[in-house]
Image: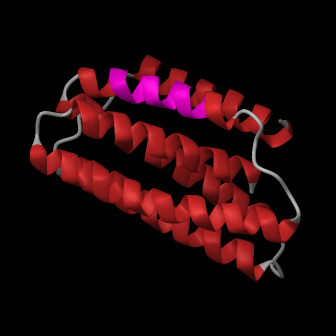
Amino acid sequence: MRVNHVGEVCAQALYAAQALTTPSPALRRQFEAAAADETDHLAWTSERLRELGARPSLLNPAWYAGAFAIGLLAGRAGNAASLGFVVETERQVEQHLQRHLDRLPVSDLASRAVVSQMKDDEARHASTAEQAGAKRLPWPVRLAMRAAAGLMTTTAHYV
């Protein structure tokens, strides 16, 4: 659950930076709406960590800062690329959450409910970004995003 919590910290930063950089009021509202969902996810994962007797990542400030910088870069690349970044990010998160659901005990209904709802919301964010004009990111960028996410996931699991 700590890894999911870190993901929500990063989502806050990404959406905030992308909302800041877009010149489009409609797109800004879209980013802000997605960020509101991510705020719910952050609260749910925080609560679940408390219930499980676990702690958040000690690196959350660094995760936030790094994700904000990445969000600024995505936003500076233009609306279509920024939306493409959302699509790729949310698709990767959706896959991660499915793997988490597959590993969770069937009896852990509370965690399963949180992860399942988050997965549905992430899929909706990706779909909304596609409908708004997302440009598919080049393969090397998608690969770099996957590698960065893997590093974050592995590190956040322990620290």
Measured from the top left, where is residue 123 in percent x and y?
42, 59
Tell me, yes or no, whether the highlighted magenta stretch contains residue 65: yes
Count of residue discs? 0
Measured from the top left, where is residue 145 in percent x and y?
52, 27
Toward the viewer: 68 or 115? Answer: 68
In which quarter of the view is residue 138 placed? top left
Residue depicted at 85% across the width and 57% down the height: 54
Q: Residue furthest top?
A: 140
Indicate whether 149 appears above or below 120: above
Toward the viewer: 34 or 123? Answer: 34
In which quarter of the view is residue 9 placed? top right
Is residue 114 rendered to the left or right of residue 56?
left
Is residue 142 rendered to the left or right of residue 113?
left
* Residue 25 visible, this orientation: yes
Toward the viewer: 64 or 85? Answer: 64
Measured from the top left, where is residue 144 in percent x and y?
53, 21
Please report the bounds of the magenta region as a residue range. 63-73
Residue depicted at 19% across the width and 26% down the height: 78
The quarter in which the C terminus is drawn is top right
Q: Assign the magenta stretch its main secondary structure.
A: helix
* Residue 83 visible, this orientation: no
In which quarter of the view is residue 20 placed? top left
Tell me, yes or no, whether the highlighted magenta stretch contains residue 50: no
Measured from the top left, where is residue 7 in percent x and y?
59, 46
Residue depicted at 66% across the width and 52% down the height: 4
Residue depicted at 35% across the width and 52% down the height: 126
**Colour pattern of the rendering:** secondary structure
Is residue 129 rendered to the left or right of residue 154?
left
Indicate whether 85 appears above or below 104: above
The quarter in which the N terminus is drawn is bottom right
Toward the viewer: 89 or 66? Answer: 66
Is residue 158 rendered to the left or right of residue 139?
right
